[in-house]
Image: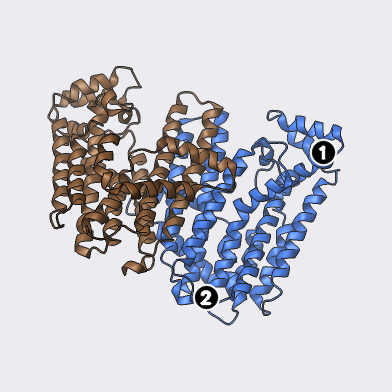
Chain colours: A brown, B blue
């Protein structure tokens, strides 16, 4: 997706470069040990999807307007928030690894990761409180309030997910609530902020927020599908992690609701097993022939269609076309 | 200190009760699993020192004025920030414990603690962005910007501390930098916010900030002294933790600089040892007869005197007297 997005985001290249610069300058410290750790963060850097959403939405909402320093700040803020969640997720993942044999080095890295995540989130709020909301006629703490509300939701989503780890009876509604809070509220706020700071009306801003929310949920469902049936080479990361982490995803949830009783019992027993090497393979062979994978694909497709529909009220522009393509890309990407 | 503080803080009892209420209502969630975890946080609740500093400073700066809803909000914000640091410190401490034998229960608790700390800090920023800065003639995002700057510093202090774990050659200047960032910038901002939101002039607000900073540094030095030589019964918590965690504290740092070479070598070897049961006892017996304990006490005393001096420009009031007593209490407390 990195290269595909690169061509999609040509339109906002100078601003994305400015986001990179601001990201690094805001996080730089008078302490060498802090800078060393912050450097490690860059290994997580990737698609910059969230900054792209801020900047593209602003351009799509107001194609003749200029992107401002505040857009760059906000795009940097959401990237910092996203990085903070990745760093803390990494702590949780490393915890899993440690379950199978801790080393002190891992542990020390973990402690640093907890504080580093805190450092990132703190700097995101700090930068956000420097945005000039009034210049756009917005309430004086509009962006800060929204970003903090968003991270409130992200944390509650993470806690809800943790509470449902190894819950093989997780229902679809709770699953959707988890991924909405964990992933989609952040992509939603990216689009809301991009629109509001481009002078979008409340109706347009709400439509953009719904675009971001729909895109985020679709993105996460597709991630879940790929984790189950993707090709590790194309996707570019280790797969089968959800099963290892005891996370029920949409195809499995649907299967547990609709498959014949003996198939349900078989999946239940496979999911309850320890990490046998061929477990993921067996689960794939069980679920792929069922209708559950297609069900999940249909759900993601419907969300992408809803996202694309949210763009209908916008004037025609290059940015609008890119946002349309990005939505489509969520379900067609090999990632 | 809880009971001693209780009588000291009689003056602000209704506001402290309001802080407790706001703390709980802000953190309450539509998700049961979140509320269950938030309840666990209350086991960390204690002295409410930081909310007291906000409220008492406001009263001392403007003895005839009324404390406002914003004072209560700010007092709740700093308590949430403090609780978040405690929860994440607990993650780091539990990590230590796990080093000596992990259980999955510990691990699961740890993961929840990472997210719970994030939940607390997120809600603190959310509440802070609801404060009416303009009503006091302050810049529109004054409190949010200050709080985020403070947490930036706290995180960098934690990282600096982590970087110097097991560094037996830690110098006094770096040690003071660590405790200033880790502890004192938060008590400093409590007093600055209390003063600024009570309409204090910039000169008075700066004096109050220095009071809070001096108090915080003195508090941490005294904590270090008690961790080394306190009586566990009086102090009310496990002692000798700093040594176990590889944290050099002021008495030890001074000893390593001034004691006879053979004593220094002995301390170095004791500190490098694993956790032999009588190690802390041996270190105590080595350091107590030296001048290093008294040196640390003198440093804490000088800081308390500086804090008390910061109050000299304030009009006479009950709140001012309480703040004076609180400063004195930092070095006389048996805790």
Q: In the shown orientation, is residue B65 left or right of residue A185?
A: right
Question: Mark 2: which secondary structure?
Answer: loop
Q: Which residue is mark 2?
A: B67
Q: Cβ–Cβ below 8 Å for labels 1 and 2?
A: no
Relative to B90, does residue A261 appear above or below in the rendering?
above
User: Which disc number belongs to residue B105?
Assistant: none
How crowded pointer 1 is (Cα within 10 Å; few <14, some 14-19, many 20+) is rated as few
Q: Is residue A69 visible?
A: yes
Relative to B311, does residue A13 appear above or below in the rendering?
above
Residue A210's x, y, as percent?
A: 21, 53
Q: Is residue B39 visible?
A: no
Relative to B173, does residue B138 appear above or below in the rendering?
below
Q: Which residue is mark 1?
A: B285
Question: Mark 1: which secondary structure?
Answer: helix
Q: Residue at x 30, y 52 (%)?
A: A54
Residue A282's x, y, as percent?
A: 24, 19
Q: Quadrant of residue B308?
A: bottom right
Q: Residue at x 40, y 43 (%)?
A: A83
Q: Residue at x 57, y 56 (%)?
A: B46
Q: Quadrant of the N terminus of chain B?
A: bottom right
Label 2: chain letter = B
């Amino acid at each position: 997706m990195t290269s595909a997005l690169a061509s999609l985001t040509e339109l906002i290249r100078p601003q994305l470069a400015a986001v990179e610069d601001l990201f690094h300058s805001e996080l730089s410290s008078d302490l060498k040990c802090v800078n060393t750790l912050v450097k490690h963060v860059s290994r997580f850097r990737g698609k910059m999807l969230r900054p792209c959403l801020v900047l593209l939405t602003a351009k799509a909402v107001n194609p003749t307007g200029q992107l401002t320093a505040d857009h760059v700040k906000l795009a940097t803020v959401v990237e910092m928030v996203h990085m903070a969640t990745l760093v803390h997720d990494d702590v949780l993942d490393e915890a899993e690894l440690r379950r199978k044999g801790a080393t002190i080095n891992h542990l020390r890295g973990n402690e640093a990761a907890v504080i580093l995540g805190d450092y990132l989130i703190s700097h995101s709020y700090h930068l956000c409180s420097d945005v000039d909301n009034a210049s756009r006629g917005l309430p004086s703490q509009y962006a800060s309030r929204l970003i903090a509300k968003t991270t409130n939701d992200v944390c509650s989503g993470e806690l809800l997910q943790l509470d449902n780890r190894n819950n093989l009876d997780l229902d679809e509604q709770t699953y959707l609530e988890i991924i909405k809070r964990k992933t989609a509220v952040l992509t939603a706020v990216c689009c809301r902020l991009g629109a509001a700071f481009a002078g979008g009306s409340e109706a347009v801003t709400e439509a953009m927020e719904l675009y971001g929310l729909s895109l985020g949920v679709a993105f996460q469902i597709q991630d879940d599908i790929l984790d189950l049936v993707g090709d590790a080479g194309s996707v570019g990361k280790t797969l089968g992690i959800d099963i290892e982490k005891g996370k029920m995803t949409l195809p499995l949830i649907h299967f547990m609701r609709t498959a014949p009783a003996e198939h349900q019992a078989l999946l239940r027993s496979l999911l309850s097993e320890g990490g046998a090497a061929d477990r993921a393979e067996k689960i794939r062979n069980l679920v792929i022939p069922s209708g559950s994978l297609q069900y999940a694909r249909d759900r993601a497709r419907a969300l992408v269609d809803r996202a694309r529909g949210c763009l209908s009220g916008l004037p025609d522009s290059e940015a609008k076309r890119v946002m349309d393509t990005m939505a489509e890309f969520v379900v067609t990407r090999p990632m």
